[in-house]
Amino acid sequence: MAADARATVLASGIGAEAAKVADGARRRILELGTSRGTPLHFGSALSALEIMAVSASVLRPGEDDFVLSKGHAALGWYAVLAERGDLEPDTFPTYGRDARLSVHPHRGSSPATTFSTGSLGHGIALATGSCLGRSLLGRSGQSHVLMGDGECQEGSVWEAAAFAADRKASGLTVIVDANGFNQNGALTGSSSCDGLAKQFAALGWQTQIVAGHDTAALSQALLRPAAHAPHAVIARTRKGHGCPQLVDAMPGAHFTSLPGG
Protein backbone atom coordinates (compact mmCIF):
# COMPACT_ATOMS: atom_id res chain seq x y z
CA MET A 1 0.00 0.00 0.00
CA ALA A 2 1.36 3.44 -0.95
CA ALA A 3 2.35 5.83 1.83
CA ASP A 4 -0.48 8.27 1.05
CA ALA A 5 -3.02 5.45 1.11
CA ARG A 6 -1.71 4.18 4.46
CA ALA A 7 -1.90 7.69 5.89
CA THR A 8 -5.50 8.02 4.73
CA VAL A 9 -6.46 4.70 6.33
CA LEU A 10 -4.73 5.67 9.58
CA ALA A 11 -6.43 9.08 9.63
CA SER A 12 -9.80 7.44 8.99
CA GLY A 13 -9.35 5.10 11.95
CA ILE A 14 -8.21 7.83 14.31
CA GLY A 15 -10.99 10.09 13.07
CA ALA A 16 -13.68 7.49 13.70
CA GLU A 17 -12.51 6.89 17.26
CA ALA A 18 -12.10 10.62 17.92
CA ALA A 19 -15.65 11.26 16.70
CA LYS A 20 -16.96 8.85 19.35
CA VAL A 21 -14.86 10.57 22.01
CA ALA A 22 -16.13 14.01 20.95
CA ASP A 23 -19.75 12.85 21.01
CA GLY A 24 -19.32 11.38 24.48
CA ALA A 25 -17.55 14.50 25.72
CA ARG A 26 -20.35 16.68 24.36
CA ARG A 27 -22.89 14.58 26.25
CA ARG A 28 -20.89 14.96 29.46
CA ILE A 29 -20.75 18.74 29.06
CA LEU A 30 -24.46 19.12 28.39
CA GLU A 31 -25.39 16.83 31.28
CA LEU A 32 -23.14 18.81 33.61
CA GLY A 33 -24.57 22.10 32.35
CA THR A 34 -28.20 21.14 32.75
CA SER A 35 -27.60 19.66 36.21
CA ARG A 36 -25.87 22.81 37.48
CA GLY A 37 -27.81 25.53 35.72
CA THR A 38 -24.94 27.97 36.25
CA PRO A 39 -23.07 29.94 33.56
CA LEU A 40 -20.12 28.12 31.98
CA HIS A 41 -18.00 28.55 28.83
CA PHE A 42 -20.14 26.21 26.73
CA GLY A 43 -19.77 27.84 23.32
CA SER A 44 -16.00 27.64 23.05
CA ALA A 45 -15.77 24.20 24.63
CA LEU A 46 -18.34 22.70 22.26
CA SER A 47 -16.83 24.24 19.13
CA ALA A 48 -13.42 22.69 19.82
CA LEU A 49 -14.30 19.15 20.98
CA GLU A 50 -13.41 17.39 17.73
CA ILE A 51 -10.08 19.23 17.58
CA MET A 52 -9.27 18.22 21.15
CA ALA A 53 -10.31 14.60 20.60
CA VAL A 54 -8.14 14.22 17.51
CA SER A 55 -5.17 15.96 19.08
CA ALA A 56 -5.38 13.74 22.16
CA SER A 57 -5.40 10.70 19.88
CA VAL A 58 -2.40 11.81 17.80
CA LEU A 59 -0.08 13.05 20.55
CA ARG A 60 2.08 10.70 22.64
CA PRO A 61 1.96 11.19 26.43
CA GLY A 62 5.35 12.06 27.84
CA GLU A 63 6.83 12.92 24.45
CA ASP A 64 4.50 15.54 22.97
CA ASP A 65 2.76 18.66 24.31
CA PHE A 66 -0.81 19.89 24.10
CA VAL A 67 -1.23 23.58 24.95
CA LEU A 68 -4.78 24.83 25.42
CA SER A 69 -4.03 28.46 24.72
CA LYS A 70 -7.75 29.34 24.82
CA GLY A 71 -7.84 28.25 28.43
CA HIS A 72 -11.51 29.13 28.93
CA ALA A 73 -12.34 26.02 26.85
CA ALA A 74 -10.92 23.77 29.61
CA LEU A 75 -14.39 22.31 30.17
CA GLY A 76 -14.08 20.66 26.75
CA TRP A 77 -10.56 19.40 27.34
CA TYR A 78 -11.51 17.79 30.65
CA ALA A 79 -14.56 16.19 29.05
CA VAL A 80 -12.40 14.69 26.30
CA LEU A 81 -9.90 13.35 28.84
CA ALA A 82 -12.75 11.88 30.89
CA GLU A 83 -14.24 10.20 27.83
CA ARG A 84 -10.84 8.74 26.92
CA GLY A 85 -10.34 7.39 30.44
CA ASP A 86 -7.49 9.79 31.19
CA LEU A 87 -9.33 11.19 34.23
CA GLU A 88 -10.73 9.22 37.13
CA PRO A 89 -14.47 8.54 36.58
CA ASP A 90 -15.72 10.84 39.35
CA THR A 91 -13.38 13.72 38.57
CA PHE A 92 -15.08 15.49 35.67
CA PRO A 93 -18.22 16.58 37.61
CA THR A 94 -15.95 18.52 40.00
CA TYR A 95 -15.03 20.96 37.21
CA GLY A 96 -14.86 24.49 38.58
CA ARG A 97 -15.44 23.31 42.13
CA ASP A 98 -12.15 21.53 42.72
CA ALA A 99 -8.60 22.86 42.59
CA ARG A 100 -7.58 20.11 40.19
CA LEU A 101 -10.13 20.85 37.47
CA SER A 102 -10.08 24.61 37.64
CA VAL A 103 -11.89 26.83 35.15
CA HIS A 104 -8.59 27.33 33.29
CA PRO A 105 -6.22 24.37 32.93
CA HIS A 106 -3.11 24.10 35.03
CA ARG A 107 -0.16 21.79 34.88
CA GLY A 108 -0.87 18.71 36.94
CA SER A 109 -4.62 18.57 36.31
CA SER A 110 -3.85 15.52 34.17
CA PRO A 111 -0.79 13.87 32.62
CA ALA A 112 -1.89 15.35 29.27
CA THR A 113 -1.91 18.96 30.53
CA THR A 114 1.68 20.17 30.31
CA PHE A 115 1.20 23.95 30.62
CA SER A 116 -0.98 26.23 32.72
CA THR A 117 -2.91 28.72 30.57
CA GLY A 118 -5.58 31.36 30.89
CA SER A 119 -4.38 34.72 29.62
CA LEU A 120 -4.93 34.67 25.87
CA GLY A 121 -2.10 34.96 23.36
CA HIS A 122 0.66 33.10 25.18
CA GLY A 123 0.17 29.45 24.20
CA ILE A 124 2.01 29.67 20.89
CA ALA A 125 5.09 31.13 22.60
CA LEU A 126 5.07 28.37 25.23
CA ALA A 127 4.84 25.64 22.61
CA THR A 128 7.52 27.25 20.42
CA GLY A 129 9.89 27.21 23.37
CA SER A 130 9.07 23.58 24.04
CA CYS A 131 9.75 22.64 20.40
CA LEU A 132 13.05 24.44 20.28
CA GLY A 133 14.06 22.99 23.63
CA ARG A 134 13.48 19.45 22.35
CA SER A 135 15.52 20.25 19.26
CA LEU A 136 18.46 21.48 21.35
CA LEU A 137 18.32 18.26 23.37
CA GLY A 138 18.18 16.13 20.24
CA ARG A 139 14.72 14.83 21.08
CA SER A 140 11.79 14.31 18.74
CA GLY A 141 8.24 15.35 19.53
CA GLN A 142 5.29 17.49 18.58
CA SER A 143 3.59 20.45 20.20
CA HIS A 144 -0.05 21.19 19.42
CA VAL A 145 -1.50 24.57 20.34
CA LEU A 146 -5.26 25.07 20.33
CA MET A 147 -6.11 28.74 19.90
CA GLY A 148 -9.25 30.75 19.26
CA ASP A 149 -9.74 32.98 16.24
CA GLY A 150 -10.57 35.86 18.57
CA GLU A 151 -7.36 35.13 20.45
CA CYS A 152 -5.46 35.73 17.22
CA GLN A 153 -6.21 39.43 17.66
CA GLU A 154 -3.53 39.45 20.36
CA GLY A 155 -0.27 40.92 19.07
CA SER A 156 1.82 38.41 21.03
CA VAL A 157 0.43 35.65 18.81
CA TRP A 158 2.05 37.11 15.71
CA GLU A 159 5.33 37.93 17.44
CA ALA A 160 5.62 34.26 18.45
CA ALA A 161 4.44 33.07 15.01
CA ALA A 162 7.14 35.13 13.27
CA PHE A 163 9.79 33.81 15.66
CA ALA A 164 8.66 30.18 15.19
CA ALA A 165 8.82 30.53 11.41
CA ASP A 166 12.26 32.14 11.55
CA ARG A 167 13.55 29.26 13.71
CA LYS A 168 11.79 26.67 11.51
CA ALA A 169 10.01 25.09 14.47
CA SER A 170 8.84 22.09 12.46
CA GLY A 171 7.46 20.23 15.47
CA LEU A 172 4.93 22.99 16.12
CA THR A 173 1.30 22.82 15.00
CA VAL A 174 -1.19 25.54 15.78
CA ILE A 175 -4.86 24.63 15.42
CA VAL A 176 -7.18 27.64 15.35
CA ASP A 177 -10.73 26.98 16.53
CA ALA A 178 -12.21 29.35 13.97
CA ASN A 179 -15.82 29.57 15.17
CA GLY A 180 -16.24 33.08 13.79
CA PHE A 181 -16.77 34.95 17.06
CA ASN A 182 -14.91 36.57 19.89
CA GLN A 183 -16.63 37.57 23.13
CA ASN A 184 -18.01 40.74 21.58
CA GLY A 185 -19.32 39.58 18.22
CA ALA A 186 -18.62 38.23 14.76
CA LEU A 187 -15.13 38.19 13.25
CA THR A 188 -14.40 39.30 9.70
CA GLY A 189 -11.52 40.43 7.52
CA SER A 190 -8.09 39.46 8.83
CA SER A 191 -9.73 37.43 11.62
CA SER A 192 -11.72 35.25 9.20
CA CYS A 193 -10.52 31.76 8.20
CA ASP A 194 -9.07 33.03 4.93
CA GLY A 195 -7.52 36.05 6.64
CA LEU A 196 -5.83 33.96 9.31
CA ALA A 197 -4.55 31.45 6.75
CA LYS A 198 -3.02 34.25 4.69
CA GLN A 199 -1.31 35.76 7.73
CA PHE A 200 0.28 32.49 8.84
CA ALA A 201 1.31 31.66 5.27
CA ALA A 202 2.88 35.11 4.83
CA LEU A 203 5.13 34.41 7.82
CA GLY A 204 6.32 31.13 6.30
CA TRP A 205 4.01 28.61 7.96
CA GLN A 206 2.58 25.63 6.13
CA THR A 207 -1.10 26.48 6.28
CA GLN A 208 -4.39 24.79 5.51
CA ILE A 209 -8.09 25.27 6.22
CA VAL A 210 -10.12 22.22 7.28
CA ALA A 211 -13.66 21.45 8.43
CA GLY A 212 -13.25 21.61 12.19
CA HIS A 213 -15.97 19.09 13.06
CA ASP A 214 -14.72 16.52 10.52
CA THR A 215 -12.49 14.26 12.61
CA ALA A 216 -11.11 12.39 9.59
CA ALA A 217 -10.01 15.64 7.95
CA LEU A 218 -8.53 16.88 11.21
CA SER A 219 -6.69 13.60 11.71
CA GLN A 220 -5.19 13.75 8.24
CA ALA A 221 -4.03 17.32 8.84
CA LEU A 222 -2.50 16.65 12.26
CA LEU A 223 -0.78 13.44 11.20
CA ARG A 224 1.18 15.23 8.47
CA PRO A 225 3.00 18.19 10.03
CA ALA A 226 5.33 20.30 7.91
CA ALA A 227 8.87 18.99 7.48
CA HIS A 228 10.78 22.28 7.64
CA ALA A 229 8.29 24.82 8.96
CA PRO A 230 5.65 25.23 11.65
CA HIS A 231 2.16 24.12 10.68
CA ALA A 232 -1.08 26.11 11.01
CA VAL A 233 -4.44 24.34 10.73
CA ILE A 234 -7.37 26.73 10.54
CA ALA A 235 -10.35 24.64 11.66
CA ARG A 236 -13.70 26.09 10.59
CA THR A 237 -16.14 25.37 13.45
CA ARG A 238 -19.47 26.52 14.89
CA LYS A 239 -19.78 28.05 18.33
CA GLY A 240 -21.84 25.77 20.58
CA HIS A 241 -21.77 22.92 18.04
CA GLY A 242 -24.15 20.12 19.00
CA CYS A 243 -26.42 22.22 21.19
CA PRO A 244 -29.15 23.86 19.05
CA GLN A 245 -29.93 26.67 21.50
CA LEU A 246 -26.28 27.73 21.57
CA VAL A 247 -25.12 27.39 17.95
CA ASP A 248 -23.92 30.80 16.82
CA ALA A 249 -26.14 32.42 19.47
CA MET A 250 -23.73 35.21 20.25
CA PRO A 251 -22.93 36.84 22.54
CA GLY A 252 -24.94 34.54 24.78
CA ALA A 253 -23.23 31.31 23.75
CA HIS A 254 -19.83 32.40 25.01
CA PHE A 255 -20.64 32.23 28.73
CA THR A 256 -24.13 31.14 29.65
CA SER A 257 -26.27 28.64 31.54
CA LEU A 258 -28.41 25.82 30.21
CA PRO A 259 -32.01 25.18 31.25
CA GLY A 260 -32.76 22.23 33.46
CA GLY A 261 -30.62 22.98 36.52
Image (cartoon, rainbow, N blue to C red):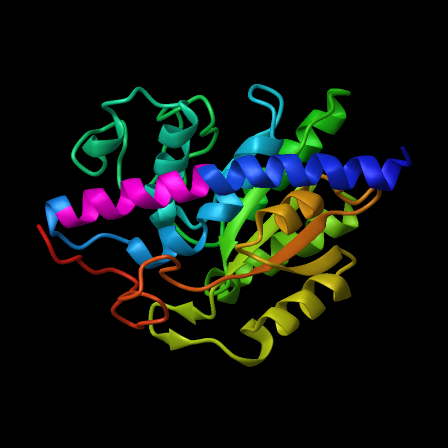
Image-quadrant location for residue 104: top left
Image-quadrant location for residue 145: top right
The residue that appears at 25% across and 69% down in the rendered structure is 252
Q: What percent of the width, then of the height, locates residue 162?
A: 70, 56
Using the image, determine if residue 191 lies above or below residue 237.
below
The residue that appears at 48% across and 28% down in the rendered structure is 114
Q: Is residue 129 visible?
A: no
User: In the depicted view, which residue is nearer to us: 167 or 30?
Assistant: 30
135 left or right of 248? right
User: In the depicted view, which residue is nearer to us: 158 or 74?
Assistant: 74
Residue 7 is a magenta residue: no
Q: What percent of the width, then of the height, locates residue 58?
A: 62, 33
In magenta, the rendered stretch is: 21-34
Q: What percent of the width, then of the height, locates residue 109?
A: 35, 26
Assign the N terminus to one quadrant of the image.
Answer: top right
Q: Is residue 109 visible?
A: yes
Q: Specify the principal SS of the magenta part.
A: helix
Q: What percent of the width, then of the height, locates residue 86?
A: 41, 23
Residue 23 is a magenta residue: yes
User: In the depicted view, which residue is nearer to us: 145 or 177?
Assistant: 177
220 left or right of 237? right
Furthest residue in direction left, as rendered: 261
